[in-house]
Amino acid sequence: MKVLVLREPEIRGLIGPGGALKAVRDAFVRLARGEATLPGVINLDIPSAQGEVHVKGAWLHGTPFFSIRRTMASRSFAKRASWAGTARAAGAAPASRKTTRMAVRST
């Protein structure tokens, strides 16, 4: 099995605003019909850094794609060098909020 990971800038290069609006509308219609799987949000609190991480995902039944969104938030990214270093190592900038969106296709 091959997995293709597309990050937000790549996705934006593949679809314009009109196409994105249609895709979102169609996804909500399919969700209302029960044709989508949205697991519960994964929430990871990190009290020592006054931060949290949220992971959300979705899959439209019958498609070879699923999506994942990760958001990191902390009130003390800038204050805690060790946490900011960990965040940079994980690909996040030491800012108050960082979001990564990915669409994944397995073949």
Image (tube, grey):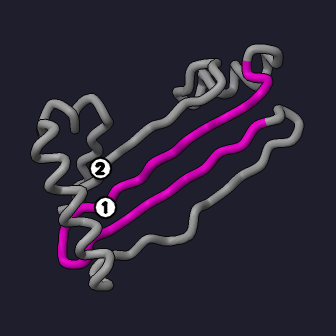
Residue 66 painted magenta:
yes
Say which residue label 1 marks. Answer: 66
How far from the left and from the top, in percent, is residue 99? Answer: 49, 35
Would you say residue 53 is visible in this rendering? yes
Say which residue label 2 marks. Answer: 103
In percent of the image, x 25 and y 77: which residue is there? 61
In percent of the image, x 27 and y 84: which residue is there? 33
User: Left or right: where does residue 70 sit relative to residue 106?
Assistant: right
User: How far is mark 1 from mark 2, CA to CA?
Assistant: 6 Å
Q: Please tell me whether residue 16 is drawn above or below residue 5 in the rendered image.
A: above
State the extent of the magenta-drawn residues as a range: 51-77
Name which residue type carries label 2.
Answer: Ala
User: Left or right: where does residue 2 sit relative to residue 81?
Assistant: left
Q: Looking at the image, is mark 1 or mark 2 earlier in the sequence?
A: 1
Residue 23: image tag: none
In percent of the image, x 29 and y 50: which residue is there? 103
User: Left or right: where does residue 73 sit relative to residue 106?
Assistant: right
Name which residue type carries label 1.
Answer: Phe
